[in-house]
Amino acid sequence: MNKKLKRAIRDGFAAPAPVGKKEFLRGLSEPPIGNFEFIITQLGYIRKWVWAAAVLIFALAVIGSEWVGRDIIWCVSAFMPLLALGIITECGRAEAYKMAELEMSTRFSIKSAVLARLGIIGGVSLILVCAVTPIIGSDIFRTGVYILCPYLLTAYLGFLAVRKIHGRESMYVCVGIAAVVSVLNIIFSTELAALYIFKNFIWWGAALAVLGIGTAVQCYKMIKQTGDLTWSL
């Protein structure tokens, strides 16, 4: 009886099939915006503290290289997880604030927004590393590896957390990950200095390769996990 009642209610309130849906959608006027303009608009949605973190790291490298010397490498690498935290939180912000479904229904879907912000912050991170590496280290390649390893470790674990933990709790976990990586970086550089001698550098290179591949895989899975609604314009 219950099933018959539910079926009757469903049939009685069933929405009629849309007439001329495709013609209506084609007739909608869309603002003339291309991919480049869309990427530029995303700059305004990236929170200011992310840009402040990039400026802070660059200033720390420039000033510290004059006053602290080569030891500034470990300070800069300890701050790199903060920049990685920015890229994670910006890519997972829609899911954290329960706005993913709304963004998936827009003309430029949430996948497009995530890719744009990922490209912007990732590009800024790359430029920053290229800018500060010759300032703080005589061996540019080794210095770059020491800086990138904490960054990629934070990014890898952060993207994994965003994929597995939903809601604002994922952001709290990402903050904790960045803090732990920063603290461990400082501890290792002071208490385990043998890790940084030249003969052990091969392990740093291997870690960079593994973390780079792992971060790319997790990033791809996160973007793939962000599905689009079929009725998106």
Image (cartoon, helix red, strand yellow):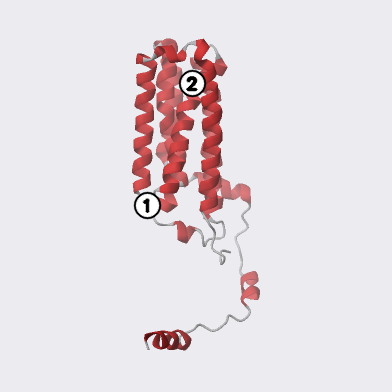
Identify the image quadrant of the C terminus.
bottom right
In this view, 67 is above or below 231: above
158 left or right of 224 in image: left
Would you say residue 133 is visible in this rendering? no
Give coordinates of residue 28: x percent, y percent. Answer: 61, 69
231 left or right of 187 in image: right
Tell which of 70 and 33 is nearer to you.
70
State which quadrant residue 212 falls in.
Answer: top right
Q: Are marks 1 and 2 in contact (CB under 8 Å)?
A: no
Tell which of 233 and 164 is nearer to you.
164
Q: How many numbered marks are there?
A: 2
Give coordinates of residue 14: x percent, y percent. Answer: 49, 84
The disc, 1 or 2, on the residue closer to the chain's N-terminal end is 2
The crowding category of the residue bearing disc 2, from other C-alpha atoms within 10 Å (few below 14, some 14 to 19, many at least 20), is: many
Would you say residue 191 is visible in this rendering? yes
Estimate the spatial distance between the alpha carbons at disc 1 and disc 2, rounded to whole Å: 32 Å
Residue at 64 percent of width and 71 percent of height: 27
Give coordinates of residue 18: x percent, y percent. Answer: 58, 80
Amino acid type for the residue under numbered disc 1: Gly
Residue 146, labelled with which disc? Answer: 2
Identify the image quadrant of the N terminus.
bottom left
Give coordinates of residue 68: x percent, y percent. Answer: 39, 12
Q: Label 1, on which residue?
A: 167
